[in-house]
Amino acid sequence: MADETLSEHGLSEGEWKVLSSLRLMKPPYRRSAGQLARRSDLSTGAMTNRLDRLEEAGLVKRVPDPEDRRGVLVELTKKGEQAWERTLGAQAAKESLIAGALTKAEQRELNALLRRLMREFEQREQGSAKPS
């Protein structure tokens, strides 16, 4: 179902992962290409190709690293953020059909558990962005 949603929005799973990795950061939603490659378990060359496609689509842009004048960061654009939100919303709508099989109490419990998981993932995302 997730693959179907991504396809409907013109994204591959790998592209979605890049957008998600950026969106889960604090604004201005930036990471280095190396960080993105490591998070996706890709070579830097493969990540460069993926970023080229996303940049061509206007979903990300490369910007100078303010802390390293030789470095470049990948930043989520407004268009990229909107694509991420639309895709996430479409998938949530599909998943709500599945949740319809649950009672209201079960839905509240599931919602609380998912919220707890999301907070944990967001904290881990934020933690991995700190310099070592």
Image (tube, rainbow, N blue to C red):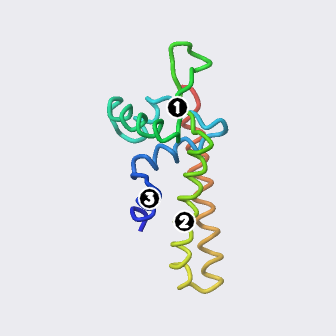
Q: Can you name the residue that lies furthest to the top here?
A: 69
Q: Position of residue 130 (x, y in %)?
A: 59, 31
Where residue 34 sits, quadrant-wise, is: top left
Where residue 131 sits, quadrant-wise, is: top right
Where residue 8 sits, quadrant-wise, is: bottom left
What residue type is disc 2 on?
Answer: Ala
In the image, is residue 24 above or below residue 115? above
The answer to the question of whether label 3 and label 2 lie on touching residues, with beta carbons closer than 8 A, is no
Residue hosting label 3: 6
Q: CA distance from mark 1 to mark 2?
A: 25 Å
Q: Earlier in the sequence, mark 3 or mark 2?
A: 3
Q: Position of residue 38 (x, y in %)?
A: 40, 35
Q: Earlier in the sequence, mark 1 or mark 2?
A: 1
Instruction: Choose between 54 and 19: the one closer to the eye.
Output: 54
- Tell me the element at label 3: helix
Q: Residue at x 52, y 39 (%)?
A: 58
- Tell me the element at label 1: strand
Q: Residue at x 40, y 35 (%)?
A: 37
What residue type is disc 1 on?
Answer: Val
Please give left or right for residue 52 compared with residue 128 in the image: left
Quadrant in which the N terminus appears: bottom left
- Tell me the element at label 2: helix
Residue hosting label 2: 90
Instruction: Choose between 114 and 18: the one closer to the eye.
Output: 18
The answer to the question of whether label 1 and label 2 lie on touching residues, with beta carbons closer than 8 A, is no
In the image, is residue 36 above or below residue 120? above
Residue hosting label 1: 74
In the image, is residue 95 above or below residue 55? below
Q: CA distance from mark 1 to mark 3?
A: 21 Å
Q: Position of residue 83 (x, y in %)?
A: 55, 52
* Mark identifier at residue 131: none
